[in-house]
Amino acid sequence: MSRIGKLPIPLPAGVTASLSGQTLEVKGPKATKSFTATDDVTITINDSDITITPRGKSKRARQQWGMTRSVVANVVHGTHANFTRNLEIRGVGYRAALQGNVVKLSLGYSHDVDFEIPEGVSVTVPKPTEIVVEGTDKQLVGQVASDIRDWRPPEPYKGKGIRYKDEYIFQKEGKKK
């Protein structure tokens, strides 16, 4: 039995949900989002929550049960609040600056890296060594943060690079003489 799937998803104040077939549409103050579930699960909307139940006992139905519940919970959360990923830049001379719809990254290359911000996500640079990625779609926010981090992932000897704010990088010992 799925421990995640059996939990009901509460609807916050100001958020409404409607169901047509297998397509769930959630409207909130920040956004309107929709999600189409597979035929392996049944979505039920009660007065103040949404429940997901599997259709049958097949392995695929049980897999889709917990995954669908997680995605629907993220859709509901995204309609009334933003998802946020904080990035931290470490390294001498490494910095970021926001210019319109482009984040300019100085990461030790012979040129600056220009990262264009996609639609549906907002990026702010409160300090030259901090980047904040926010949006209503959890997958898109995580993907944009990962794309920025991929330009210079943290290295294990000095810890230089772009890392998530809550990420721990295991420091290796350098070469001995």
Image (cartoon, helix red, strand yellow):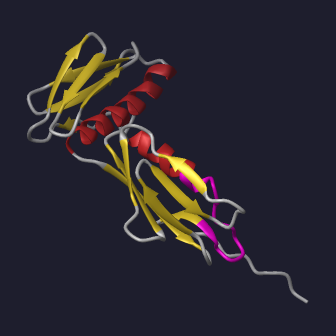
Q: Quadrant of residue 48?
A: top left
What range of the chain is rendered magenta?
A: 148-161
The picture places residue 4, in percent across and down from the top left corner, at 36, 39
Left/right placement of residue 132 relative to residue 171 reads left
The picture places residue 63, in percent across and down from the top left corner, at 47, 28
Q: Residue furthest top?
A: 21
Looking at the rendered image, the quarter that the C terminus falls into is bottom right
Q: Is residue 62 magenta?
A: no
Q: Residue furthest bottom?
A: 177
Which is nearer the eye, 27 or 147? 147
Q: Name the residue located 23 percent from the left edge and 35 percent from the top edge.
A: 31
Looking at the rendered image, the quarter that the N terminus falls into is top left
Q: Is residue 165 above or below residue 82?
A: below
- Magenta part mainly helix, strand or loop? loop
The picture places residue 58, in percent across and down from the top left corner, at 48, 18
Q: Is residue 97 above or below residue 147?
A: below
Residue 1 visible in rendering? no
For the image shown, how many numbered marks are present on the structure? 0
Left/right placement of residue 109 relative to residue 63 reads right
Which is nearer the eye, 100 or 119? 100
Q: Name the residue located 56 percent from the left edge and 60 percent from the top edge.
A: 105
Q: Quadrant of residue 141?
A: top left
Q: Is residue 168 above or below residue 75?
A: below
Q: Residue furthest right?
A: 177
Q: Name the residue located 8 percent from the left edge and 28 percent from the top edge.
A: 47
Q: Quadrant of residue 22?
A: top left
Left/right placement of residue 86 relative to residue 30 reads right
Residue 69 visible in rendering? yes
Q: Is residue 156 magenta?
A: yes
Q: Is residue 164 above or below residue 11?
A: below
